[in-house]
Image (cartoon, rainbow, N blue to C red):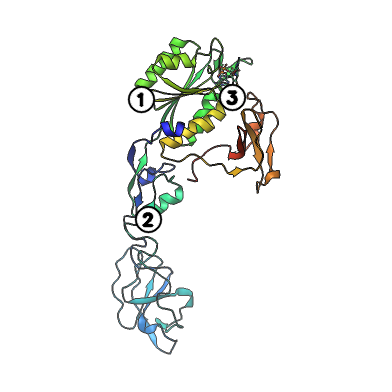
């Protein structure tokens, strides 16, 4: 449902150097050939066709060196031209003799052993041709892709705008990190969700906490809607207590609740709402692991849709017969190889227990009449 209700965002054009971890919104084409000209692959001597045969007693005179960045003139008859790696190869040169194989006698190159035509020459366009389609939409730009695109002459590209996300923690009891007494509750969810979504490429504004008052929460929402945040993510106040005021506040500002409550643990009270102005609300439960699960699986599903990406696929599906009852999302540790025996469900799965997160690297999703599946701890989006 989330995937159908969140649309891909508008693209923007950015410089290739700025594109790390951004997602392409349109195909990216090579702007020129690579290599852009016939180029020497070695430091050595450019030699003409007539010198390719067996070594003989003849000698070639040594011309002026050809360095990278200089245009290449034709070889003269009987010339062997010193050439640097990356330098343009003269049009009538047939091969490059590597420097270590060259025998120089009185400023002349002794005719070399037989060389194959084209030896040590990188041909223009052998890696990419101008106009080749390099990337489809929805590709994450990695450091390697930045290097390749620069070489292929790409200067800028259309990428998805970063999703703009506001994060607000609900709860009278919450204090920000560093401003706590021993008995205070630290707003740990805000920084955690901010880190998770920031890491996934979102433009995140972390707002801190707000007291449990419907009017105050609704006014904060009004302001966020006016500021055109696309995603308003809250934690806490999502359940059924007297002071759980998320839902009435969302409805007060015109939010349309699509679902509130999911048959799963942790994360049961999660809320998803849309707003006629285009914003999306996620109300995540206050219990820290429930908040993490909600951000990891529900908010990230929306972020994927917003970036034009498909739903995430599990890294593994188990043969296991599903249990009855709610879907369980279990912190797990996988070891190299990930065979059945290598997936350990960690102890202490309650949604206030953070200790298993110190070693977990995966989630096992079990129950809900589906085969059990395995997902990495975070959806970094990078492999797609
Ligand atoms: N009668 C029922 N009670 C509860 C139900 C239920 O179905 N019926 N569901 C339980 C489940 S499951 C969850 S999860 C929690 C979620 O409740 P809320 O979303 O309303 O969260 P709060 O009550 O505000 O807080 C719960 C817990 O989490 C701590 N918290 C809250 N915000 C933060 C934060 N930003 N950082 C760290 N910790 C936070 C808060 O202090 C509470 O200890 O409801 C159950 N109850
Ligand atoms: O589902 Mo609550 O999310 O158990 O902690």
> Tag on residue 288?
3
Q: Categorize mark 2 by other alpha carbons within 10 Å: few (<14), some (14-19), many (20+).
A: some
Mark 3 → mark 2, Cα distance in angstroms: 45 Å
> Tag on residue 228?
1
The image shows residue 293 at horizontal and vertical percentages of 56, 30
Question: Which quadrant of the view contains residue 323?
Answer: top right
Ligand 1 is found in the corner quadrant, namely top right
The image shows residue 255 at horizontal and vertical percentages of 41, 19
Q: Does residue 106 appear anywhere in the picture?
A: no
The image shows residue 329 at horizontal and vertical percentages of 61, 32
Tell me which label, 3 or 1, sits earlier in the chain: 1
Q: Residue at x 60, y 15 (%)?
A: 184
Please determine whether, in this image, residue 380 is positioned above or below residue 32. above
Mark 3 → mark 1, Cα distance in angstroms: 27 Å
Q: Secondary structure at mark 3?
A: helix
Mark 2 → mark 1, Cα distance in angstroms: 38 Å
């Amino acid at each position: 449902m989330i995937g159908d209700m969140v649309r891909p965002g508008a693209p923007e054009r950015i410089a290739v150097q700025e594109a790390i971890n951004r997602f392409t919104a349109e195909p990216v084409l090579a702007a020129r050939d690579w290599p852009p000209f016939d180029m020497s692959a070695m430091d050595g001597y450019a030699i003409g066709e007539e010198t390719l045969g067996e070594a003989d007693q003849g000698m070639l005179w040594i011309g002026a060196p050809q360095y990278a960045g200089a245009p290449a003139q034709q070889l003269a008859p009987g010339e062997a031209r010193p050439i640097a790696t990356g330098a343009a190869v003269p049009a009538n040169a047939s091969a490059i003799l590597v420097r270590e194989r060259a025998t120089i006698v009185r400023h002349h190159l002794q005719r070399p052993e037989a060389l194959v035509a084209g030896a040590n020459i990188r041909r223009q366009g052998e890696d990419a041709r101008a106009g080749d389609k390099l990337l489809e939409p929805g590709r994450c730009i990695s450091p390697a892709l930045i290097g390749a695109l620069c070489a292929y002459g790409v200067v800028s590209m259309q990428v998805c705008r970063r999703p703009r996300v506001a994060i607000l923690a609900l709860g009278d009891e919450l204090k920000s990190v560093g401003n706590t007494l021993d008995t205070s509750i630290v707003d740990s969810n805000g920084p955690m969700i901010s880190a998770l979504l920031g890491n996934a490429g979102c433009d995140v504004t972390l707002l801190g906490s707000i007291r449990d008052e419907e009017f105050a929460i609704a006014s904060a929402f009004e302001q966020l809607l006016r500021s055109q945040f696309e995603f308003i993510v809250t934690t806490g106040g999502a359940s059924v207590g007297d002071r759980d005021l998320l839902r009435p506040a969302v409805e007060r500002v015109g939010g349309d609740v699509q679902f509130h409550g999911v048959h799963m643990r942790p994360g049961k009270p999660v809320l998803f709402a849309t707003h006629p102005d285009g914003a999306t609300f996620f109300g995540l439960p206050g219990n820290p692991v429930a908040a993490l699960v909600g951000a990891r699986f529900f908010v990230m599903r929306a972020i994927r849709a917003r970036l034009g990406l498909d739903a995430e696929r599990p890294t593994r599906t188990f043969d296991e017969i599903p249990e009855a009852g709610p879907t369980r999302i279990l912190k797990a540790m996988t070891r190299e190889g990930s065979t059945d025996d290598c997936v350990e469900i960690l102890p202490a799965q309650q949604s206030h227990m953070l200790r298993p997160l110190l070693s977990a690297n995966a989630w096992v999703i079990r129950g809900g009449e589906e085969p059990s599946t395995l997902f990495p701890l975070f959806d970094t989006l990078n492999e797609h």
